[in-house]
């Protein structure tokens, strides 16, 4: 089969690779109809997540048709149309029993490696380095889905792929970010990053009843999407004025947002001047893995007693964490890779009810063979790119 | 085991090396190499100054006035390294002893090693084919962003 594989920093290529096989009774093989490039794939592409190997198949957002299943897969049949969540979860361990699927204790075969990096192992993830299990990803014609009786959600409505594909990651991840903010209605929420996850965090905050949602980015077209489609009430373009903290205070009467969502993560572009230069140098020399501009500003801007929700990916260590502001303002820091399996059914219901049409983020629909150019276009924000969907069945 | 790409020096790290090497050559290097007061020291200081000058003008993350493309910068690196190594032999100063040519050659080898480990594609450089993407794309990005109704209904609207 054809697959988009990691070929070193800033390079992917389409290669012929062996078809996946059932290795375990709880595996299924999915013929992929749609798959997407995620913003977090760019951390792999840029070379900031270690343990990638040449030839690793990328992609953790995909859906398709079950074409084969192991004997232990209950609830799915060959021919079923499914969306596959990005964390691989066994469903049986303590974490899964507590709906903490992204920290499943059984699905990462390289648990020792993850324990060294994070103190504990986290769940396996499709196509996301050997630190998270070395699983083949979904930017391919087929994928092996372990624990297929736990993860995939069956799509029985006639919604298009684009309407349901993002249940695999970015919609639940954005929703999770908003959910961590304890929105009860009437709050002001700021969202750093208006990429796909940020767009869904904004839309989810609106869906939950937030009164004001402030989108922060440096690309005007992304801010326009946030305002026109996701429901943002305010936007801050830090390419115009880099002092985001001051602007957030200004638009909230000096108090600051009730909660701030960091949907930017370790490669936050925001930040200018000496501090930005120091971070860039430290990251380039591998003496700091994460650039913390967004997180630092989130902590500084959030109102006292507020919540900082981190759903942008961080990989290791960052410097100049504002611990004084964090402690003295009594902030709550909440974070995580999304426990997607927990949100699949309620979010699918939102789609079926017409509360949200997740396809609004799709700006590029390409064939699988276009994936390398798609990565570049997405990374460099060319051609008003927000989200790239790949169709393996196209040449 | 972490697996690193074969060319681990990206354009930012290359800039760090440029500024460190350039300023060291202009200041401490001649003294540490016991060349003070010699023609070799002047040559190495000049090489450091030139290196700093075109680094400042390079279009990479640490450049200040981004007028020289990154790949041209790498080309200048190679030419400058070759010129530095050749200088003692062109001037004939190599006849005065090893200290008059070994530093030049060593610095030149360092430069070539640095170039060999540098990813020439440049981290910040777009190397895709945006026209091919436009031709293959089945969506109109502009209309998706600017046209049509909002994609989400607030709870009050949803209830109504």
Image: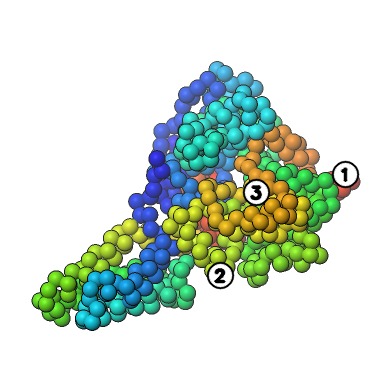
Residue B105 image-quadrant placement: bottom left
Q: CA distance from mark 2 to mark 1?
A: 48 Å
Within 10 angstroms of label 1, few (less than 14), some, or many (20 or more) residues? few
Going 59% across and 31% down the picture, which residue do you hit?
A104
Q: Position of residue A320 (x, y in %)?
A: 57, 58
Q: Is residue A211 left or right of residue A95?
A: right
Provide the residue designation for mark 3: A310
Provide the residue designation for mark 1: B159
Q: Chain of mark 1?
A: B
Rendered position, A377 above or below B68:
above
Provide the residue designation for mark 2: A273
Give the structural element (helix, strand or loop) at label 2. Answer: helix
Going 57% across and 29% down the picture, which residue do you hit?
A105
Within 10 angstroms of label 3, few (less than 14), some, or many (20 or more) residues? many
Q: Is residue B135 left or right of residue B13?
A: right
Give the structural element (helix, strand or loop) at label 1. Answer: helix
């Amino acid at each position: 089969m054809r697959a988009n594989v990691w070929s070193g920093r800033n390079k992917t290529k389409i290669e012929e690779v062996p078809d996946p096989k059932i290795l375990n009774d709880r595996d299924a093989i999915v013929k992929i109809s749609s798959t997407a490039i995620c913003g977090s794939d760019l951390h792999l592409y840029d070379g900031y997540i270690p343990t990638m190997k040449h030839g690793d198949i990328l992609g953790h957002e995909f859906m398709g048709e079950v074409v084969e299943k192991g004997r232990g897969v209950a609830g799915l049949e060959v021919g079923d149309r499914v969306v596959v969540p990005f964390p691989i979860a066994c469903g049986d361990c303590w974490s899964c029993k507590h709906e903490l699927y992204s920290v499943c204790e059984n699905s990462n075969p390289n648990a020792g490696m993850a324990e060294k990096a994070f103190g504990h192992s986290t769940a396996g993830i499709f196509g996301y380095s050997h630190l998270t299990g070395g699983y083949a990803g979904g930017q391919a014609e087929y994928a092996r889905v372990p624990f297929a009786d736990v993860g995939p959600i069956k799509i029985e409505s006639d919604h298009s792929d684009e309407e349901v594909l993002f249940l695999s990651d970015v919609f639940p991840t954005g929703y999770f970010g908003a959910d961590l903010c304890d929105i009860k209605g009437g709050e002001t929420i700021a969202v750093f990053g208006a990429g796909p996850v940020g767009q869904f965090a904004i839309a989810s905050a609106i869906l939950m009843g937030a009164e004001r949602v402030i989108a922060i980015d440096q690309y005007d077209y992304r801010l326009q999407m946030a305002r026109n489609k996701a429901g943002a009430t305010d936007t801050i373009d830090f390419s115009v004025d880099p002092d985001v903290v001051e602007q957030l205070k200004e638009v909230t009467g000096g108090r600051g947002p009730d909660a701030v969502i960091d949907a930017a993560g370790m490669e936050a572009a925001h930040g200018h001047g000496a501090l930005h230069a120091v971070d860039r140098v430290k990251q380039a020399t591998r003496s700091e893995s994460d650039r913390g501009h967004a997180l630092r500003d989130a902590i500084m801007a959030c109102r006292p007693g507020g919540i900082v929700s981190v759903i942008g990916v961080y990989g290791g260590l960052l410097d100049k964490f504002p611990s004084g502001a964090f402690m003295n303002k009594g902030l709550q820091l909440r974070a995580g890779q999304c426990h997607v399996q927990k949100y699949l059914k309620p979010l699918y219901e939102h789609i079926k009810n017409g509360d949200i049409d997740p396809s609004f983020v799709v700006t590029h629909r390409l064939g699988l063979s276009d994936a390398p150019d798609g990565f570049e276009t997405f990374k460099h924000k060319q051609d008003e790119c927000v989200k790239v969907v790949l169709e393996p069945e196209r040449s | 085991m972490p697996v690193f790409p074969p060319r681990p020096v990206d354009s930012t790290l290359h800039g760090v090396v440029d500024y460190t090497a350039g300023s060291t050559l202009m200041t401490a290097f001649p003294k540490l190499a016991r060349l003070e007061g010699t023609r070799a020291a002047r040559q190495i200081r000049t090489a450091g100054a030139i290196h700093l000058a075109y680094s400042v003008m390079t279009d990479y993350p640490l450049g200040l006035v981004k007028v020289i493309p990154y790949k041209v910068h790498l080309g200048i690196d190679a030419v400058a390294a070759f010129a530095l190594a050749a200088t003692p032999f062109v001037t004939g100063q190599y006849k005065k002893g090893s200290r008059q040519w070994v530093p030049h050659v060593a610095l030149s080898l360092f430069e070539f090693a640095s170039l060999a480990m540098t990813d020439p594609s440049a981290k910040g450089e777009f190397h895709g084919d945006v026209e091919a993407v436009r031709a293959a794309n089945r969506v109109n990005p502009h209309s998706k962003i600017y046209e049509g109704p909002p994609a989400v209904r607030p709870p009050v609207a949803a209830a109504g």
